[in-house]
């Protein structure tokens, strides 16, 4: 079992390529109301969870809701790839604005496995090259997360480690 220590009030950023199992992990470990997913916010603002042209508006709304939740002292999980420094910077900013610790959980599975899963899905239509680019972004992300301001960076490598992970909440006071 891999125990992931997380402050009981945190902004948790899941980080991983498409098909790495972020939404599955979020569904297993957190209440649905704690999880803000980029897909859901794209659907909210554009009626289409895959409409990438709606991303800016979707993330704007996601950050707004995250801020509302953190202000109320509620743990919040962001289910998005979070592979780009600017995407993560926005999350660190929201967390800091509310005096909440930003935490990253990286899900790292082999790209071939993620592709296999992605190909099997009817709700994902992007090509292999898009996934390859995500993998490059993930590799670059490793050295960045701590210096970007994430107070804890938990890395789960491979499906077994992901399966065996358990969250343990740390009391703040
Ligand atoms: P995206 O970034 O595209 O939203 P994701 O990281 O959220 O992807 P999931 O939707 O959680 O990935 O998982 C992708 C597919 O892989 C799903 O069909 C899911 O059922 C399957 N999957 C996820 N985790 C596992 C697992 N541990 N074992 C087998 N299949 C899994
Ligand atoms: Mg997902």
Image (cartoon, rainbow, N blue to C red):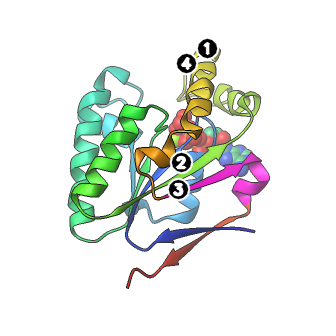
Name the spot of residue 93 as percent of width and height, x first: 28, 48
Q: Viewer-proximal residue, 100 or 54?
A: 100
Q: Secondary structure at mark 3?
A: helix
Name the spot of residue 105 as percent of width and height, x first: 55, 53
Q: Viewer-proximal residue, 71 or 153?
A: 153
Identify residue for label 3: 26
Mark 2 in CB contact with mark 3 (< 8 angstroms): yes
Q: Which residues are the magenta region?
A: 152-163
In the rendered image, the quadrant that contains the C terminus is bottom left
Q: CA distance from mark 4 to mark 3?
A: 22 Å
Check if residue 154 falls in the magenta segment. yes
In the rendered image, the quadrant that contains the N terminus is bottom right
Q: Secondary structure at mark 2?
A: helix
* Residue that sits furthest to the front in the current view: 147
Name the spot of residue 163 as percent of width and height, x first: 72, 58
Identify residue for label 2: 23
- Against 56, residue 2 (above or below) is below
Asked whether mark 2 and ligand 2 are closer than 8 Å, the reply comes as yes
* Residue that sits furthest to the bottom in the current view: 173
Residue 126: which numbered mark, if any? Answer: 4
Asked whether mark 3 and ligand 1 are closer than 8 Å, the reply comes as yes
Mark 2 in CB contact with mark 4 (< 8 angstroms): no
**At 35% from the left edge and 29% from the top edge, which residue is drawn?**
48
Identify residue for label 1: 129
Q: Residues within 10 Å of mark 1 (few under 14, many from 20)?
A: few
**At 22% from the left edge and 56% from the top edge, which residue is drawn?**
97
Q: Viewer-proximal residue, 48 or 100?
A: 100
Q: CA distance from mark 2 to mark 3?
A: 5 Å
Mark 4 in CB contact with mark 3 (< 8 angstroms): no
Name the spot of residue 64 as percent of width and height, x first: 21, 48
């Amino acid at each position: 079992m891999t125990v992931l220590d997380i402050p009981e009030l945190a902004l948790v950023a899941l980080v991983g390529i498409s098909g790495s199992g972020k939404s599955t992990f979020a569904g297993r470990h957190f209440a649905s109301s704690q999880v803000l997913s980029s897909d859901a916010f794209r659907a909210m603002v554009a009626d289409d969870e895959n409409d990438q042209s709606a991303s800016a508006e979707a993330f704007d709304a996601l950050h707004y809701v995250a801020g509302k939740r953190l202000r109320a002292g509620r743990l919040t999980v962001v289910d998005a790839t979070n592979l780009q420094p600017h995407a993560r910077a926005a999350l660190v900013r929201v967390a800091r604005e509310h005096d909440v610790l930003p935490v990253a959980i990286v899900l790292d599975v082999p790209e071939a496995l993620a592709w296999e899963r992605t190909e099997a899905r009817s709700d994902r239509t992007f090509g292999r090259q898009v996934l390859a680019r995500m993998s490059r972004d993930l590799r670059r992300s490793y050295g960045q997360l701590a210096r970007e301001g994430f107070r804890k960076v938990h890395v789960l490598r491979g499906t077994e480690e992901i399966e065996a992970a358990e969250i343990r909440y740390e009391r703040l006071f």
